[in-house]
Amino acid sequence: MHTSSHHSPTDTLESFTSFTGSFKGLTLVATPIGNLGDFSLRAIEVLTKSDLILCEDTRTTAPLLKKYGITTKTEALHEHNERQRIPSLITSLQTGKTIALVSDAGMPLLSDPGFQLVQAAIQADIPITAIPGPNAALTALVLSGLPPYPFLFSGFPPSRQSARKKSFTHIQNAEQNGLTATLIWYEAPHRLVETLEDLVSVFGAERPAVVTRELTKRFEEIRRGTLQELALFYTQNAPRGEITLLLGPSLQNTPTTSSQTLDTILLSLLQSYSVKDASTLLARATGVPKKILYTRALTLSHQ
């Protein structure tokens, strides 16, 4: 046992906050997904000491800032203005300003604005750090009872049914070629039933699934069942609030197209098509990533 350098919890807290306080650059700050008590001490300090807080919607963030007495200037950064705002924000960061980025709820960038700004900051060699915290997808995952990893988070499914079913079919094609993962989406309450029905049509009625609602809030709900059972339940009980939808991994994870079969098809296609066109055609037909097929087609074409 080491007794020479004892650190109290207060010392540890001070070491964290002193690092945070001296940081100059862009900080991505996680905010509560429902319960305001989930806001971290470090997040409060960073927002208090920043020169500017970029919010997805300043009106949504205002109650949180008011609760913790944070009076830092706020400005909006959302999908409609992010690209235009970047040059001036990068200039501010280069002159030594400390800027914090928050979304309406949870971790910034995950189905929220900020990715373009982060890319621009990296290219400009501006320091970036993050204050970790609440995230609906991970909270739902650990509560679901489904395998926690690997998982595939896809944000919101497309709002149009044709595009939504197409995106689900792409994932199902990947499963047929070996993908085994718990699948996670966010969804709006008024589209939940349609989305569940589309999942039934693509993945089958008996696939295990979970719907979580209002995580960390008073009426938190975690409902587990098959896709068919959940579709029926929410047809009869209109859902409200913030929703995270999870689909258990495929129970039949044996690839339907073996690598040997793919080689045979590729060799056949290469007799009539270029390497690029052959790999593109087969990628569309099987759902196997085009890069993988292109590399294989290149090898086969030189044999």
Image (cartoon, rainbow, N blue to C red):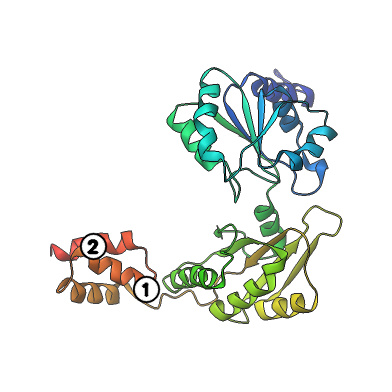
**Around disc 2, counting alpha carbons within 10 Å, would you say few (fewer than 14), some (14 to 19), or many (20 or more)?**
some
- In which image quadrant can residue 185 be found? bottom right
Identified by mark 1, the residue type is: Thr
Q: Is residue 193 above or below residue 54?
A: below
Residue 22, given in percent of the width and then of the height, sits at 63, 18
Q: Residue at x 29, y 66 (%)?
A: 280
Residue of label 1: 286
Q: What mark, if any, has residue 276 been given in the picture?
A: 2
**Looking at the image, which is closer to me, 157 or 179?**
157
Q: Residue at x 69, y 42 (%)?
A: 57
Figure quadrant of the C terminus:
bottom left
Q: Secondary structure at mark 2?
A: helix
Q: Is residue 192 above or below residue 113?
A: below
Residue 180, given in percent of the width and then of the height, sits at 51, 67
Q: Secondary structure at mark 1?
A: helix
Identified by mark 2, the residue type is: Lys
Q: Residue at x 81, y 39 (%)?
A: 63
Q: What mark, if any, has residue 24 been given in the picture?
A: none
User: Which mark is nearer the camera, 2 or 1?
Assistant: 2
**Looking at the image, which is closer to me, 182 or 159?**
159
* Residue 148 visible within the image: yes
Residue 263, given in percent of the width and then of the height, sits at 24, 72
Tag 2 near tag 1, CB within 8 Å: no
Left or right? Give the position of 241 relative to 157: right
